[in-house]
């Protein structure tokens, strides 16, 4: 199934379900799906209702689009994303972002659960992504260039919107919400990293590691969208503390930090609205 056809099916399904003007699109990572439930006047479109649309089998991903309101504006939320480690081809990883672009959305907010590499960070904290290192070995733009979205060799010198990062950090400080900033490194997963890898990533300038987000950020930047990224640091990365890592712990800590995550997401949406 050509990727563009899947995108077109999804755009049509979302438009048929709801015609509100969309102010931004959000992709919610592991444990962060609860933000969608805080929106008002919700309309949902299940991935399974869209012809040929993939579903994420990862626990904690609900596999639906949610359209809903916050502070008088309407947002499109993906509750459930596709990961490289699930076996999807790289080109499939950015379809959510292209659906958002085709719906007229100009800003995407990408969220994830991540392991903290920076030893000054703490599990349960949130981090604004200032830049990324693509250590996955793949790129979602490999293959024919879709010129309708962007150019063959897109610039990546500023992927994440620095004006929004600054505004959100300042507001979080005023609200006494602990919020870090740092570089996100993407690994393919699904295995967690070894302590030696984490020591290496720290030396490379990576503050947090995870298994998502970077393909979506690349596809969004290619399409000329404004990108905002936020990580929920669910654990200290391998070897920083003696505990073994598990997806259950990731989800447990994410649940504990869900309230702060929702608050920071609201600050982000406010900053996007005012940008
Ligand atoms: N490593 C990679 N991905 C993750 C981690 C981690 O420690 N925690 C949550 N997602």
Image (spheres, helix red, strand yellow):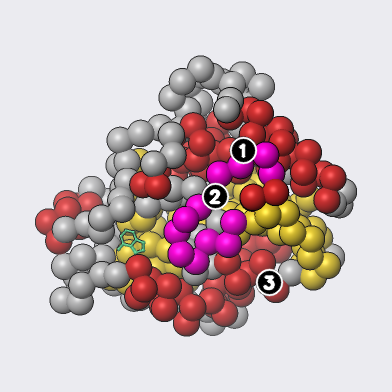
Q: Residues within 10 Å of mark 2 (few under 14, many from 20)?
A: some
At 49% from the left edge and 32% from the top edge, which residue is drawn?
91
56 in the magenta segment: yes
Q: Decide: is 91 above or below 185.
A: above
Q: Is residue 26 left or right of residue 182?
A: right
Q: Secondary structure at mark 1?
A: loop
- What's the CA distance linking mark 3 and mark 1? 26 Å
Q: Is residue 152 left or right of residue 171?
A: left
Which mark is drawn over residue 37? 3
What is the x, y in percent for residue 238? 21, 65
Mark found first going from the N terminus, 2 or 3: 3
- The residue under label 2 is 55
Residue 96 magenta: no
Quarter-of-image position of residue 262 = bottom right
Above or below: residue 52 compared with residue 232: above
Q: Position of residue 260 (x, y in %)?
A: 54, 77
Check disc 1 and report the residue beneath it: 52
x then y, percent, for residue 58:
45, 59
Mark 3 or 1, closer to the camera: 1
> In what quadrant of the picture does the N terminus appear?
top right
What residue range appears in magenta? 50-63
The reply to whether callout 1 and callout 2 are in contact (CB within 8 Å) is no
Separation (CA) of disc 2 from disc 3:
20 Å
Element type at marker 3? helix
Whether residue 132 is visible to the viewer of this picture, yes or no, is no
């Amino acid at each position: 199934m050509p990727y563009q056809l899947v995108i077109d099916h999804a755009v049509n399904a979302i438009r048929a379900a709801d015609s509100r003007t969309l102010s931004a699109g959000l992709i919610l990572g592991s444990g962060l799906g609860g933000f969608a439930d805080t929106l008002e006047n919700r309309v949902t479109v299940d991935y399974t209702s869209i012809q040929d649309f993939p579903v994420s089998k990862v626990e904690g991903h609900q596999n639906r689009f949610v359209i809903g309101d916050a502070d008088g504006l309407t947002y499109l939320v993906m509750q459930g994303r596709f990961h490289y480690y699930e076996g999807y081809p790289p080109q499939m990883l950015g379809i959510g972002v292209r659906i958002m672009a085709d719906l007229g959305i100009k800003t995407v907010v990408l969220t994830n659960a991540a392991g903290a590499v920076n030893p000054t960070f703490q599990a349960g904290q949130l981090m604004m992504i200032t830049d990324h290192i693509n250590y996955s070995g793949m790129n979602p733009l490999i293959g024919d260039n879709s010129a309708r979205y962007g150019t063959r060799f897109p610039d990546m010198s500023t992927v994440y919107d620095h004006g929004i990062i600054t505004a959100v950090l300042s507001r979080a400080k005023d609200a006494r919400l602990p919020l870090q900033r740092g570089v996100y490194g993407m690994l393919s997963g699904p295995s967690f990293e070894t302590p030696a890898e984490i020591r290496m990533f720290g030396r490379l300038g990576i503050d947090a590691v995870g298994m998502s987000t970077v393909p979506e950020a690349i596809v969004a930047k290619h399409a000329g969208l404004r990108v905002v990224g936020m990580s929920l640091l669910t654990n200290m990365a391998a070897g920083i503390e003696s505990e073994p890592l598990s997806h259950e712990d990731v989800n447990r800590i994410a649940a504990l930090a869900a309230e702060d995550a929702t608050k920071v997401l609201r600050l982000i949406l406010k900053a996007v609205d005012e940008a």
